[in-house]
Image (cartoon, grey):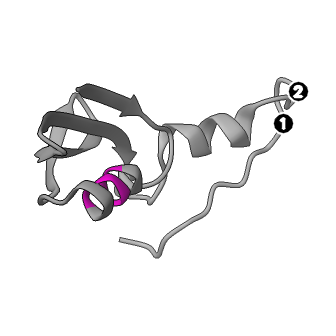
Amino acid sequence: MKGHQIAEWGNGEIIDACAAVMGGTVVRSTLNRDNDRQGVAQLVTVYAGVPVEVGAGYPLPDEHGLIAADLRDLFTARPLGALVCLPGGGAR
Protein backbone atom coordinates (compact mmCIF):
# COMPACT_ATOMS: atom_id res chain seq x y z
CA MET A 1 0.00 0.00 0.00
CA LYS A 2 1.35 3.45 -0.92
CA GLY A 3 0.15 6.93 -0.10
CA HIS A 4 1.32 10.52 -0.33
CA GLN A 5 -0.07 13.81 0.92
CA ILE A 6 0.99 17.33 -0.02
CA ALA A 7 -0.01 19.79 2.70
CA GLU A 8 0.09 23.58 2.98
CA TRP A 9 0.50 23.49 6.74
CA GLY A 10 1.76 21.23 9.51
CA ASN A 11 4.90 19.17 9.69
CA GLY A 12 3.79 15.77 8.45
CA GLU A 13 1.93 14.85 11.63
CA ILE A 14 -0.27 12.47 9.62
CA ILE A 15 2.80 10.29 9.05
CA ASP A 16 3.56 10.32 12.78
CA ALA A 17 -0.03 9.14 13.38
CA CYS A 18 0.45 6.30 10.86
CA ALA A 19 3.65 5.23 12.64
CA ALA A 20 1.85 5.26 16.00
CA VAL A 21 -0.73 2.81 14.63
CA MET A 22 1.40 0.66 12.30
CA GLY A 23 4.82 0.91 13.93
CA GLY A 24 8.06 1.96 12.30
CA THR A 25 10.19 5.08 12.37
CA VAL A 26 9.37 8.29 10.53
CA VAL A 27 12.25 9.72 8.52
CA ARG A 28 12.29 13.44 7.76
CA SER A 29 14.29 15.33 5.16
CA THR A 30 14.39 18.76 3.54
CA LEU A 31 14.30 19.60 -0.16
CA ASN A 32 15.46 22.96 -1.50
CA ARG A 33 13.95 24.32 -4.71
CA ASP A 34 15.15 27.78 -5.67
CA ASN A 35 14.29 29.86 -2.58
CA ASP A 36 11.56 27.48 -1.37
CA ARG A 37 12.16 24.73 1.16
CA GLN A 38 9.94 21.69 1.54
CA GLY A 39 9.90 19.15 4.34
CA VAL A 40 9.25 15.49 3.64
CA ALA A 41 8.15 12.86 6.18
CA GLN A 42 8.27 9.20 5.13
CA LEU A 43 7.33 5.89 6.71
CA VAL A 44 8.13 2.46 5.29
CA THR A 45 6.88 -0.43 7.40
CA VAL A 46 4.93 -3.69 7.33
CA TYR A 47 1.48 -3.74 8.94
CA ALA A 48 -0.53 -6.95 9.25
CA GLY A 49 1.76 -8.54 6.68
CA VAL A 50 1.22 -5.75 4.13
CA PRO A 51 4.14 -3.54 3.03
CA VAL A 52 3.23 0.12 3.60
CA GLU A 53 4.91 3.26 2.21
CA VAL A 54 3.45 6.64 3.10
CA GLY A 55 4.87 10.12 2.79
CA ALA A 56 3.89 13.74 3.19
CA GLY A 57 5.37 16.92 1.78
CA TYR A 58 4.87 20.24 3.51
CA PRO A 59 6.28 23.76 3.14
CA LEU A 60 8.96 24.98 5.53
CA PRO A 61 9.02 28.62 6.61
CA ASP A 62 11.49 31.02 5.03
CA GLU A 63 13.92 33.15 7.05
CA HIS A 64 10.98 35.41 7.99
CA GLY A 65 8.89 32.51 9.31
CA LEU A 66 6.42 32.62 6.39
CA ILE A 67 5.21 29.90 4.05
CA ALA A 68 3.44 30.38 0.71
CA ALA A 69 0.01 29.83 2.32
CA ASP A 70 0.70 32.71 4.74
CA LEU A 71 1.45 35.06 1.87
CA ARG A 72 -1.62 33.90 -0.05
CA ASP A 73 -3.82 34.59 2.99
CA LEU A 74 -2.29 38.05 3.42
CA PHE A 75 -2.81 39.10 -0.19
CA THR A 76 -6.10 37.36 -1.08
CA ALA A 77 -9.12 39.62 -1.59
CA ARG A 78 -7.17 42.83 -1.06
CA PRO A 79 -7.63 45.68 -3.50
CA LEU A 80 -4.70 46.67 -5.68
CA GLY A 81 -2.49 49.10 -3.78
CA ALA A 82 -3.63 47.96 -0.32
CA LEU A 83 -0.95 48.02 2.36
CA VAL A 84 -0.22 44.59 3.81
CA CYS A 85 1.66 44.36 7.10
CA LEU A 86 3.86 41.28 7.21
CA PRO A 87 4.78 39.75 10.54
CA GLY A 88 8.27 41.04 11.15
CA GLY A 89 11.44 40.06 12.79
CA GLY A 90 14.12 42.19 14.30
CA ALA A 91 16.53 44.28 12.28
CA ARG A 92 19.57 42.50 10.90
Residue 87 seen: yes
Residue 31, label in figure: none
Magenta residues span 15-19
Structural crowding at the residue carrying mark 2, measured as other residues with C-alpha within 10 Å and reported as few (<14), some (14–19) or many (≥20): few
Residue displayed at 70% across by 40% down: 73
Q: Are marks 2 and 1 in contact (CB under 8 Å)?
A: yes
Farthest residue in the bottom direction? 90
Residue 11 seen: no
Query: Is residue 68 rendered to the left or right of residue 41?
Result: right
In this figure, which residue is indicated by the disc labeled 1? 82
In this figure, which residue is indicated by the disc labeled 2? 79
Element assignment for label 2: loop
From this view, report whether residue 9 is shown above or below residue 90: above
Quarter of the N terminus within the rendering: top left
Closer to the camera, 13 or 86? Answer: 13
In x, y percent, where is residue 3?
30, 28
In x, y percent, where is residue 60?
35, 49
